[in-house]
Image: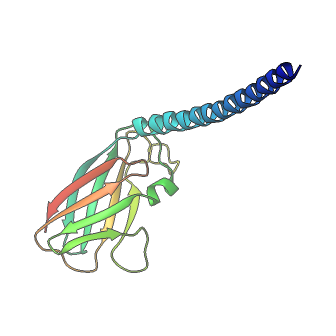
């Protein structure tokens, strides 16, 4: 009789431990599926984002850099997404992150050159012009690096 009771206790313990292992596995597999779906969605958006710097120009009379960028991807950028672009200026004097619509210089703003449907979005095939207003006059070579919200990097080069 005591052998039967100890066998029942061991069997019950095995069922409890097995249930705990299955529950832990299900939790991790659910998390894995969630993470996988987030990564797939992120990849979808990144694969739709593509742009190309068409021209970069330094306007010495206005002490500003103009960068024209063509949306060559499938993603429509909202004004909020555009305002989140990272604009970085590299000159002979160093590297500087340029804020969007700052009250102090340097600062950058943009306009859509050919908003075909007048929706205020930067649609595929449209071109924007980023105007970087500078605090100091440029001399020599410069580089403008623009990072879009989804990690796509663009680069324009010029000289003063």
Residue 68 relative to residue 142: left or right: right
Among all residues in the image, which is located at the extreme left?
140
Front-lying residue, 34 or 139: 34
Front-lying residue, 152 or 79: 152
Name the residue located 61 percent from the left edge and 35 percent from the top edge.
Answer: 28
Q: How many marks?
A: 0
Residue 107 relative to residue 75: left or right: left
Name the residue located 18 percent from the left edge and 69 percent from the top edge.
Answer: 91
Q: Position of residue 43 (x, y in %)?
A: 45, 36
Front-lying residue, 153 or 83: 153
Q: Position of residue 21 (x, y in %)?
A: 67, 31
Q: Position of residue 160 (x, y in %)?
A: 13, 69
Residue 142 relative to residue 116: left or right: left
Name the residue located 52 percent from the left edge and 36 percent from the top edge.
Answer: 41
Among all residues in the image, which is located at the extreme right?
1
Please, is residue 16 above or below residue 149 in the view?
A: above
Q: Which color scheme is applied?
A: rainbow
Q: Position of residue 13 (x, y in %)?
A: 76, 29
Among all residues in the image, which is located at the extreme front?
2
Please, is residue 139 above or below residue 123 in the view?
A: below
Name the residue located 37 percent from the left edge and 39 percent from the top edge.
Answer: 125
Q: Quadrant of the N terminus?
A: top right
């Amino acid at each position: 009789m005591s052998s039967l009771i100890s066998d029942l206790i061991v069997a019950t313990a095995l069922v409890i431990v097995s249930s705990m292992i299955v529950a832990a596995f299900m939790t991790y597999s659910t998390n894995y599926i969630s993470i996988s779906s987030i990564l797939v969605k992120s990849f979808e958006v990144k694969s739709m984002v593509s742009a190309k710097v068409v021209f970069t120009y330094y306007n010495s009379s206005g002490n500003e850099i103009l960068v024209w960028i063509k949306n060559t991807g499938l993603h429509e950028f909202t004004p909020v997404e555009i305002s989140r672009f990272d604009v970085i200026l590299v000159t002979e004097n160093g590297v500087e992150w340029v804020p969007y619509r700052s009250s102090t210089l340097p600062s950058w703003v943009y306009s859509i050159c050919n908003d075909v449907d007048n929706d205020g979005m930067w649609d595929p095939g449209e071109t924007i012009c980023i105007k970087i207003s500078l605090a100091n006059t440029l001399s020599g070579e410069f580089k403008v690096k623009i990072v879009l919200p989804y990690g796509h990097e663009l680069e324009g080069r010029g000289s003063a």
